[in-house]
Amino acid sequence: MVFLAEDLGGLTALIGVIGAAVGAGIGYGIAHVIFSKRVRQTESQAEKLTAKARQEADALLKDARVTVKEEAIRARDVFEKETSKTREEQRERERLVTKREDALESKMETLSHKEKTVEAGEKRVADIEKNYKTKQADLDRMIADEKRTLFKISGLDQNQARAMLLERMEAEVQHEAAALIQRATEQAQETSDQKARQILATTIQRLASEYTAEATVSTVDIPSDEMKGRIIGREGRNIRAFERVTGVDVIVDDTPGVVVLSSFDPVRREVARRSLTKLIADGRIQPPRIEQIVCECRKDVEADILEAGKQVALDTGVRGLHPKEVQLLGRLKYRTSYGQSVLQHSIEVAHLSGMLAEELGLDGQLARRAGLLHDIGKAVDHEVQGGHPEIGADLARRYNEREEVVHAISGHHEANVPDALYTMIVSAADAVSASRPGARRETLEKYVQRLEKLEEIAKRFAGVDSAYAIQAGREVRVVVDADKVNDDLAITVCRDIAKAVENELTYPGEVKVTLIRERRIVEYAR
């Protein structure tokens, strides 16, 4: 039984092995069939893809051939066009070259003709030069002969003859120079004087201003001399209180019916005048009342100053002034210079400057502004050190005025400012306003000094016998020695005197220099 079980076990194992082998064979057969089928399918698909790829390749090849042909056609067309254009340009260049060659040949012919002409001219010049040298040699020989003959006849040596010749030539040159100076001077005066007179006449004709002249003292009328005692007060307390509050000197003298107020500050003097007038009208003159009235009058004067400044700016058409500038202009209402109201003078200078600038084609508004402000420094010149041009220029800079205005204020008294047109215009307008007859009063001492200086300048020139200042210093007549100064030299001396007066003397308007040269011969018949 044991053996049978072992045989059955081996048989079972053998059957299992045989089954496995059969299964493996069947599986292999099935796999081979499936693989073969898939291979056939893959080959079929590969053939289809290959055929399709060949068809696409054939189509692409046809398209490429068509594209290449089209590109070749287009390239050939472009090449033909460029070739045609190049040929046309080449033909145009050939025509230009031919034209230039023709022009060059023509120029060469002209140049050849000119060369022949120049050669002929040079030949003529050479002949002329040869003749000139020959004639020059003959002339030199003749001059030498003439010199020897003249030396023999005159008895002069060569140095003496040369000195005589130089003296004669110097006299001739001096005569020609004097004549040239006279012609140039007459021509310049004829044009410049005519134009200047026309501009100034037109300008002054359009301007009319009235002047008020006030002295450095003010007078107040009183109803009777008894009022003088009340003004002085007991032991002088009223007059001391008045002088202390107002800052002016009160002069009570024997002059009937008036009291004199004196002060260097015109504004203070005006406040004092109004205050004293009110006190006299009120009748209550005592220290407390004096202080009250002076305070009221000071406010009134300040209001009048501001109103006067605004009115001046309005009348002259100058806009955009700083409020402090308006106030300073108003203060000029009470300021005088040589008896001329500075405010009225500034108004006239503003109008004159504006019209002169417009006549010359410049900015009339800017010139009026500079003319109006040119003396603004006089409003505070008694409070600040320095001259009124420098003070006014500093004020203008402080209030942001334009540089032309600042320069006109600082330089309107300078003698020569050729680079600043508006300064020259303001200076000319200032001179016109100041030199107008009756506009200013001049002290006798200064007037006499100016006349003496005028005569002194004229007398220091060589050949001048005497000089006389006439026409209130507007003309100087100079008498020269006829033996020392001839007619030609007289013109030069007169011109030099005028130049010296311009450079050394300050004067309003112009000074006429008249030179007199005469020879008097006296004989007596007995």
Image (cartoon, rainbow, N blue to C red):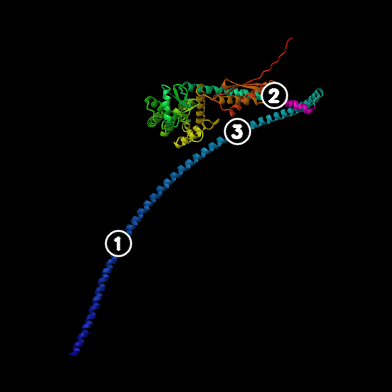
Q: Position of residue 406 (x, y in %)?
A: 48, 34
Cα–Cα span, label 3 and label 2: 53 Å
x 53%, y 38%: residue = 94
List the residue tagged with mark 1. Answer: 45
Question: Where are the magenta residues, as a range?
Answer: 157-173
Mark 1 nearby-residue class (10 Å; few <14, some 14–19, many ≥20): few
Q: How many numbered marks appear?
A: 3
| Amino acid on which disc 3 is placed | Lys
| Amino acid on which disc 1 is placed | Gln
SS of the residue at dot 1?
A: helix
Mark 3 nearby-residue class (10 Å; few <14, some 14–19, many ≥20): few
Where the N terminus falls, by quadrant? bottom left
The outermost residue toward the left is 1
Number of the front mark, 3 or 2: 2
SS of the residue at dot 2?
A: helix
Q: Which of marks 2 and 3 precedes in the sequence?
A: 3
Q: Position of residue 63 (x, y in %)?
A: 36, 51
* Magenta span contains residue 105: no
Q: In the depicted view, which residue is nearer to us: 29 or 270? A: 270
List the residue tagged with mark 3. Answer: 107
Q: In this image, 234 relative to 147: left or right?
A: left
Q: In this image, 118 relative to 379: left or right?
A: right
List the residue tagged with mark 2. Answer: 172
Q: In the depicted view, which residue is nearer to us: 326 or 78? A: 326
Number of the front mark, 2 or 1: 2
